[in-house]
Structures are given as structure tokens and as C-alpha cells.
Image (cartoon, rainbow, N blue to C red):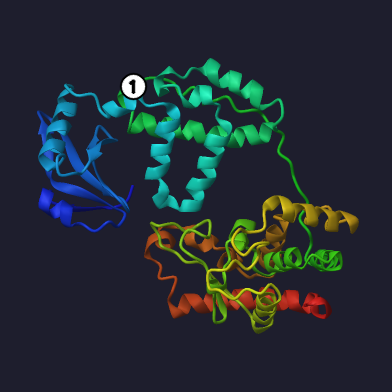
Amino acid sequence: MLKANKFEFSDKKIDALPYVEKMYSNSVWLRNGLEEAKLKLRVYKTKKSFCLYFNERLITLGKFTETYGVAHANSDALRIMTGTLTPNPESRGMGFGKLGAKIFDDKESKGRSFVDVNRRKFFNNVPRSILEKQINKITREDVIAWKETFLRDKSQAYWNKVLEVPTNIWNEASKTYAFSLLENRRNPFSCIKEEVAKQTYPVPTFNQLKEIWRALRSHGHQKVLAIVKLKILTGMHFSEIQKLRLRHIQGEWLVMDVGQHKNSNNQNQIRHKIYLSPQVLKLVKTWVDMFEVVEPDQLLFSHTGVTPISDKSFNSVWLRATRSANLDFRFDRLRHCLITDMKNSDHDPKYITGHCYLENTASKFYTDWDSEAMANKFKQVNLFWQTKVYNLVNNMWF
């Protein structure tokens, strides 16, 4: 939950608040005998919504409008506290799918990419028979039947990943939108995971990076080769590379948008930066010219300039090139190679990968990542790694 800013609520004050994602708390307590609760206001980009924090649960009351203001919200809150009003009556007739969509909308402050991935997993996999059911009508038998159908043509490992999403939706709903319907009910999605033997994938050694570089170079697909080179040099996730645009190249830095890096979101407002050594910057500029990237918002790696290279088309080239050279490595293992080699070299890879952002409370909330001192740390570590790779593949750089 976002840290709340306290003030005494009034319709006039709330109406004047800007549409910037933030949680506010009424400085006046609501009391019913010995019970206490707080009226809160969650501001989104397009709306303002009243909530009640009561019995360690955050209950949505309703959207702030001309007809639903502080007095109305306080009245509903007190009725909930006294048991004369069921929280979130609109959720009682809401299907699980619509409830999920509402929760995804409320979670967008965690980062658009994070929400979009889970939204797709939810709606592309959960069957309509479950999506259209009221949440308290979903049974364990419903989930088991879905599982049996799902596993006919999909893997157990993927089932476990998909199952996490409706499990979390149900848990979130039980705390907020529909807790009165779900109180003391067991989550029907829990404990239906499949035991999957953990697969281990080989990590290339530093010297094998040269073989991978050569294999992709000889295969002739320039954009896939460029993506592989950038992955080796920066450790970026494929999803981050897919979203790179010309405007992200700022001097000797790649500067991502908020939410583009996996540890960045609207709450911490981190824009992950990667230093580009003179050799790497020259390489990147070569790609810009080669792929005719001219507009600031144009994608660096795209077949159309509008949509990024898909996972499927990239993987088909990657697999053909690496297997023809007898190199059986997954693409994401290149990042593992970077981290392993840097640690063995007594250099901390967190300033390349961005793991530094989540290291502790100070890193999450109190560190000025844009300061000159932090920039120097990022620069030193990136320069060390990029120079080492350059020396390894020197004669095949372009």
C-alpha cells in the first residue's frame, strides 16, 4: 500500500487533489464503541475512490463523485462497522473475470508490464466457465476440471505459473472487494500445483560467449545478432530490449522508462540506466543507422518500426544458430554468465542488472540513483564488463 498523506477530508479538498497515484488518509478516526477505522482515499490517474481500513482489511466503498462524497462514504463506513451494510455490494453479482479485471486495474501502480503479463495469463488461460462464476461459487472441483483440460496440451510447469494468478486474485478479493463473501472460505485455487522436477540449464562460460557471438554472426540475421550482442554486453532481459526506442539512447547512457526494468514501477519511479562504453556506443549507433531508426519513439529492434520482434521469431533464429554450432544454451543464460563471471572477478553485477534497487529498504526508498556518485558506480562496473567482452571478441565486434 502506498504511504498515506493525512488531512481532514472534505469534498472541496478531495476535488482539488491532482490525479496522481497516491493514497490519502482522513485524519479523523471513525469509531463504533471500542472499534476504530480510517476512511481513506485512493487516487488513480483517472478517478478517486473511497476505501475503509477496518479489521486489517482495505474495503472499497465507492468512487468519489458529486453525489458520493465524504458524508456518504462516512455513512457507509459506519454501517459496515456496525454490520448493517455488506461491503462492496457490487462484487456480489460480479463474475470472477470482472473482479479480476478490477483488481488488475487497481494494481497498475506496480508497473504496467507486470500487470499486463499477469492479465494475459489470467484471461488467456482461465476458462469462461470459471471467469463467469461469482467468486464464492467457484469450487475446488471446478479448478481440478480446468487443470485436467489444461494439462492435455500444456506443461505442468506452465500450469503452476498460470495458477499463481487466479490464486492471487482470489486472495486479494478475500481481503478487499469480497471479503464478506469469502470469510473463512478456503481458496479453491490453492494447493493444486503440480510437482515438477526442477530443470537445470547450463550456463555458458565467459570464453563460450565468443562462440555464441560467432555462431549468430555467421547466421546472418542482423537484428537477432544485435539483440544477442546487447544481451551479452548489458545483461538486459529480452522484454527490456524489445521496448528499446531511439529516445532511450541519451549520450553515453541507455535510460529506460519507468516500469521498463523489472525492478522499476510507478511507486519507486526508478529509470534504470546502463552506461555504454565508447566501443559499445559506436556499436549501438551502427545499429541505429543499419536499421534506419530515425524517430525518437521508433523501436530499435522491430520488423515494422511499431511492433517489437516477437519471442517466437527471435527464438527460431537463436535455436537454429546455436544448435548448428553445438551450443545448447538458453538465451536467458547469457545474463547468468555475466553475473557469475563478474562475481568471480570481484565486481558487483548488481549495478549492471539492477538488483541493487531491491537490496534493502534504503535501496528501495532512500537512495538517489541519479546522483553523480551512483552514476560513477554504474559506469565503472559496466565499463569493466563491456571492455572485457570487447577484448574477447575484438575482431568480430561489428
Observer able to see residue 154: yes
How far across and how far down the image is residue 1, in percent?
A: 33, 47
- 158 vs 123, left or right, is right
Question: Which residue is disc 1 drawn over?
Answer: 181
- 272 vs 134, left or right, is right
Query: Foreground: 82 or 243?
Result: 243
How far across and how far down the image is residue 165, in percent?
A: 51, 36
Residue, x 68% and y 31% (percent of image)?
156
Classify mark 1: helix, strand or loop. helix
Amino acid carrying label 1: it is Leu
Decide: is 38 above or below 362.
above
Decide: is 288 above or below 129.
below
> What crowding class fits label 1: few (fewer than 14 Cα within 10 Å), some (14-19), or many (20 or more)?
many
Decide: is 49 above or below 6.
above
How far across and how far down the image is residue 370, in percent?
A: 44, 74
The number of numbered badges drawn on the structure is 1
Q: Name which quarter of the figure residue 73 lies in.
A: top left
Residue, x 50% and y 32% (percent of image)?
166
- 188 vs 20, left or right, is right
Query: Foreground: 360 or 181?
Result: 181
Q: Name which quarter of the figure residue 94 lies in.
A: top left
Q: Quadrant of the C terminus?
A: bottom right
Single out the residue that lies furthest toward the front. 304
Residue, x 57% and y 68% (percent of image)?
298
Observer able to see residue 35: no
Residue, x 52% and y 60% (percent of image)?
260
Query: Foreground: 67 or 92?
Result: 67
How far across and how far down the image is residue 146, in percent?
A: 59, 22
